[in-house]
Image: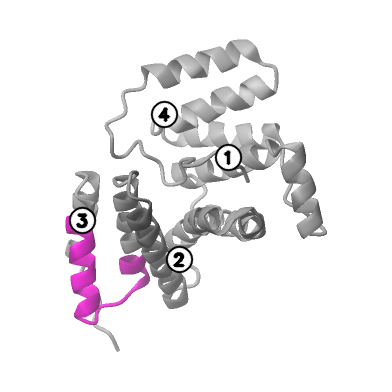
Amino acid sequence: MAESTSSDILTAVDELHSAGKEKEARDQLKAELAAGRESAEIYWRLARECRGLANRCPDSEEQRKALIYEAFESAKKGLAAEPDNWSCHKWMGILLDLTGRFEGTKKRIENSFLVKEHFTKALDKKPDDAVVLHCLGVWCYEVANLSWLQRNMAAAFFAKPPTSTYEEALEYLLRAEKASPNFYASNLNYIGKAYYQLKKLPEAKEFFQKTINHEADGHDDREPIQNEDKSSV
């Protein structure tokens, strides 16, 4: 049986993450794995740090891709170790979407069903997690916002393509904002966009202004499923 990682190590890793020191956190997690201390708690944190490092190298597509796939493999191992771990489901949903972006529209649409399934399982375990609520809100918005061409492409690939509405997106996004006010500028922006799509212009203007006023710190505000390309789903 593998030796378990102490809570002090996990706390130290979380503190490094909060300080924007993803590389140091990743190195510490890898040291735990090298020592035979494997667990879901190690693997989902490793996925988180790899994703954070990928955020920091937007100009190196090859390096970013390698980090995203390393994060994806870590999330998979975490779920294999503990299938009911809500954090592993959260990161599996995030990384399924991100890897799908490298693999083309068909794969991303195919992944979209599993993406929502993992987010929903995470939410069942942690109904007030702002990141999961935000991720679901973004998922719903992007699906509702599919272009005519993308919808027809999805219908050609699958008998039942993903569906959602701006109302559903707004519900999740507002729940995320209630759970953790002003935690992501992106969440404020998506709320504004959802209100705009619903023709609620005063509300849209309010949240767009909040987005502008939001002072991102350059680390925590770079949410895990930020749009890195112009595709949707």
Q: Earlier in the sequence, mark 3 or mark 4?
A: 3
Mark count: 4
On the rendered structure, is 27 left or right of 39? left
The residue where tag 1 is placed is: 137
Is label 1 or label 3 in front?
3
Residue at (50, 19) in percent of width and height:
207
Residue shown at 47% from the left, 45% from the top = 225
Q: Which residue is mark 4?
A: 185
Residue that mark 2 sits on: 85
Q: Is residue 44 magenta?
A: no
Precedes in sequence: disc 2 or disc 4: 2
Tell me which secondary structure the magenta stretch mostly adopts.
helix
Identify which amino acid the numbered label 3 is placed on: Lys
Residue 23 marker: 3
| Colour setting | one colour
Q: Residues within 10 Å of mark 1 (few under 14, many from 20)?
A: many
Within-10-Å neighbours for mark 3: few <14, some 14–19, many 20+: some
Q: Can you tell which of label 3 and label 2 is closer to the viewer? A: 3
Q: Amino acid at mark 4?
A: Ala
Q: Secondary structure at mark 1?
A: helix
Q: Position of residue 89 (x, y in %)?
A: 49, 61
